Image (cartoon, rainbow, N blue to C red):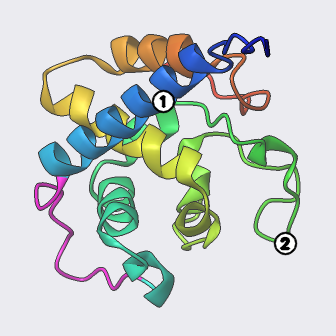
Amino acid sequence: MVKKKKRTKKGGNAALIMSLLVIASAAAYFVTREKAELPVDVQLPDYAYKNERVLTAYRVAVAYPEIGRAVPCYCGCKDVRSEQFPTGHRSLYNCFLSDDGRFTSHGANCFICVDEMLESYQMYLQGNSLKQIRAAIDARYAGRYAEPTPTPWPR
């Protein structure tokens, strides 16, 4: 008689968590799309049109810079050095724009940056303060990805 091996659910919780993250991200997209209006004189770079989620994140970064400046990024970009960022990114805002307002393509190529921006904007639309948004993002992302950018707490 051949014994059947018992199957164990490896990664069952991880799969559930990932599914919930996908659902939350999709919900954030549908809630936020079309709501972030750009100033008339702003021309987004071509890479901002990669997909609807990326486009919405860039629109939010331009229309509501206070959100991105209040929230740290957890993708590891604090260590990304370039001419625009000689000391690395300082906040989620820098994933989309430099402190002097020049666009950067980093956010167009990073799902963590886009997710953080859309989730932050969704909370902002729900009436949360910048401090509440910051606390929620920290609670959700801390320890999951990379060390965060050195973003000061909002006032």
Mark 2 crowd level (few <14, some 14–19, many ≥20, 10 Å Cα): few
Mark 1 and mark 2: Cα distance apart in space: 23 Å
Residue 153 appears in the picture as rendered: no
Residue at the image point whose x is 66% and y is 15% from the top: 7
Q: Is residue 35 magenta?
A: yes
Q: Which span of residues is magenta-colored? A: 33-44
Q: Quadrant of the N terminus?
A: top right
- Residue 80's place in the image compared with 112, above or below, is below
Residue at the image point whose x is 39% and y is 39% from the top: 22
- Callout 2, which amino acid? Glu
Secondary structure of the residue carrying tag 1 is helix
The x and y percentages for residue 61 are: 39, 55
Secondary structure of the residue carrying tag 2 is loop
Viewed as shown, does residue 26 lie left or right of 134?
Answer: left
Q: Main secondary structure of the magenta part?
A: loop
Mark 1 crowd level (few <14, some 14–19, many ≥20, 10 Å Cα): many
Residue at the image point whose x is 72% and y is 16% from the top: 143
- Callout 1, which amino acid? Ala
The x and y percentages for residue 116 are: 46, 38
Label 1, on which residue? 70
Quarter of the image holding residue 82?
A: bottom right
Label 2, on which residue? 83
The x and y percentages for residue 12 are: 56, 18
Q: Quadrant of the C terminus?
A: top left
Viewed as shown, does residue 17 lie left or right of 66?
Answer: right
- Residue 136's place in the image compared with 96, above or below, is above
In the orientation shown, which residue stands out farthest toward the bottom?
Answer: 46
